[in-house]
Amino acid sequence: MFQKLVAVEQLNLVPHANEEIAKRALEYVHYEDIPETEEEVIRRAKDADAILVNLTTQITANIIEHCPKLRYIGMCCSLYDENSASVDIRCARKHNIIVKGVNDYGDNGVGEYVVAELSSLLHGFHGKRWDERSFELTGFPVGIIGMGATGKTVAKALHFFGADLTYYSRSRKPEIEEMGISYMPLDALLEKNYCICTCLNKFVTLLNKPEFEKLGNHKILFNTGLTPASDLNALKQWLSHGDNYYYCDSNMALGDQSLRNYEHVSCFGGYSGGSYQAIERLTEKTLQNMDAFLKED
């Protein structure tokens, strides 16, 4: 059992989550706002031996250094690698602090988002159509950049409808290729496909001016990540010349609102991976992470 457990910000878990979390600590303190400064995070966490965070607050080395009792950091959000994490995992490791995050809780909703928006655009279901003709997903060329959990979910969803799929990622994915989805180098992927879907980790920018030149005109670009996968200026130039379409999930809320001024930009504004079922999975896995740590401790 934790001595003092602190949720340093609003966690976005199911309503009864705080009751379950409190069972795992002698003292549990939870805050329902987002701290504005590192000093405020330190004030909230300095006496805790465990903290919980959402994706909004960065737990920096400075914060970790000022919390000498800390031995567990629970991320109530995705953790795919150290470079994209909102916690300084390298510093935490130096202090023997365990950091646990949650994977594979919201990917189903993201897959549904891509299928719904792309199908609507190709057919013109809501008055906006990509081409003069109506297209099915069947046989439509789609390239997926990034083949982690989200990329695989999007691939499987589009594969079900018979899309012509290819992918690019840092490493080959045999299980995806067994489905008949071929790997392609990035430039070739951009040139071949009418639709590109980026499914990358936070803070990974892969599409710059040369990539947009390869992508060309009359194309559709989806970004499902929490941060933009494209250089903003290059993206704006691409949108300004031709009849290209850009769809994003939640990342515009974290970035430049000026993209909304472009006719062919559509941003969900929320997070398609934040369904009721996804939040239930997130809560369950957050509790499982805590229990696993306490069992081993």
Image: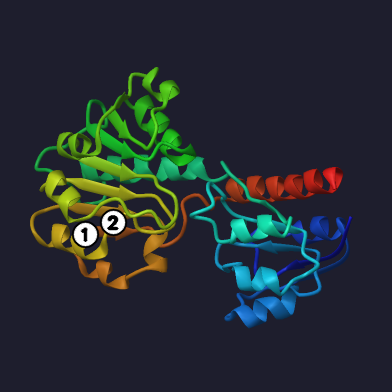
| Lower position in the chain sequence, tag 2 or tag 1 | 2
Q: Which residue is mark 2?
A: 230
Q: Is residue 269 above or below residue 245?
A: below
Q: Secondary structure at mark 1?
A: helix
Here the colouring is: rainbow
Q: Which residue is mark 1?
A: 235
Q: Secondary structure at mark 2?
A: loop
Q: Is residue 66 visible?
A: yes
Measuring from the top left, give residue 153's x and y in whole percent.
45, 35
Q: Amino acid at mark 2?
A: Ser
Measuring from the top left, give residue 219's x and y in whole percent.
17, 45
Q: Amino acid at mark 1?
A: Leu
Measuring from the top left, give residue 26's x and y in whole percent.
91, 64
Q: Residue at x 24, y 33 (%)?
A: 185
Q: Indicate left or right for 234 with 43 as reference.
A: left
Q: Is residue 165 above or below residue 235?
A: above
Measuring from the top left, give residue 247's x and y in whole percent.
30, 53
Q: Are marks 2 and 1 in contact (CB under 8 Å)?
A: yes
